[in-house]
Amino acid sequence: MAILGVGVDVVEIDRFAASLAKRPRLAERCFTEAEAAYCLSRKFPPQHFAARFAAKEAVGKALGIGMTRWREVEVVRGRGAPTIALHGRYAERGAALGVTVIHISLTHGRDSAIAFAIAEG
């Protein structure tokens, strides 16, 4: 296996919370139903939305194409660490690069959410 791409992103939680409040459809536009349901089930949803937004940005950077189709990169929760599911153009880009897995690490503190992605193949 080889590392094919790396991406990192940081999101200010308060700014993201303000964006969500100002534009109610932002969550619908950027997150899948499963992602939104998970975030909304948490005590302070904005920090979880911000972490997932950072994850999508980090994955786009790892694939070398940035983010334009937010719902095509999905943070999937299960047992243990979150995983990434690629759809549409992002799945095509991953396949073209030979990506077999994207490792993702998310964290958030009081002020910021950070995500780090490694595309491996």
Image (spheres, helix red, strand yellow):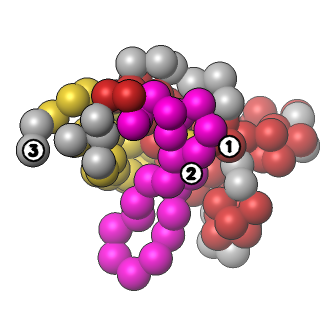
- Give the residue type at disc 1: Arg
**Which residue is most to the top?**
65
* Residue 27 x %, y %: 78, 46
Is 73 or 116 nearer to us in this picture? 73
Which span is picked out in magenta? Answer: 74-95
Per the image, label 2 sits on a secondary structure element best described as strand
Q: Left or right: where does residue 102 sit relative to residue 39?
A: left
| Residue 15 position by quadrant | top right
Q: Nearer the viewer, residue 103 or 112?
A: 103
What residue is drawn where x is 39% and y is 18%?
64
Q: In the figure, residue 16 lies in which quadrant?
A: top right
Quadrant holding the N terminus: top left
Give the number of the mark in front: 3 or 2: 3
In contact (CB < 8 Å): disc 1 and disc 2: yes
The percent coordinates of residue 39 (x first, y second) are: 65, 63
What is the distance, in whole Å, between disc 1 and disc 3 at their CAs?
27 Å
Which type of secondary structure does the marked residue at label 1 adopt? helix
Name the residue beneath numbered marker 1. 71
Q: Would you name the residue on which mark 3 appears?
A: 1
Q: Which residue is mark 2?
A: 74
- Amino acid carrying label 2: it is Glu
Label drawn at residue 35: none
For label 3, the crowd category at 10 Å Cα-Cα, with few meaning under 14, some 14 to 19 and many 20 or more, is few
Residue depicted at 59% across the width and 45% down the height = 87
Q: Residue at x 39, y 81 (%)?
A: 79
Front disc: 1 or 3: 3
- Residue 33 belongs to the span the image colors magenta: no
Question: Is residue 92 part of the magenta span, yes or no?
Answer: yes
111 vs 119, left or right, is: right
Label 2 crowd bin: few (<14), some (14–19), many (20+), radius 10 Å: many
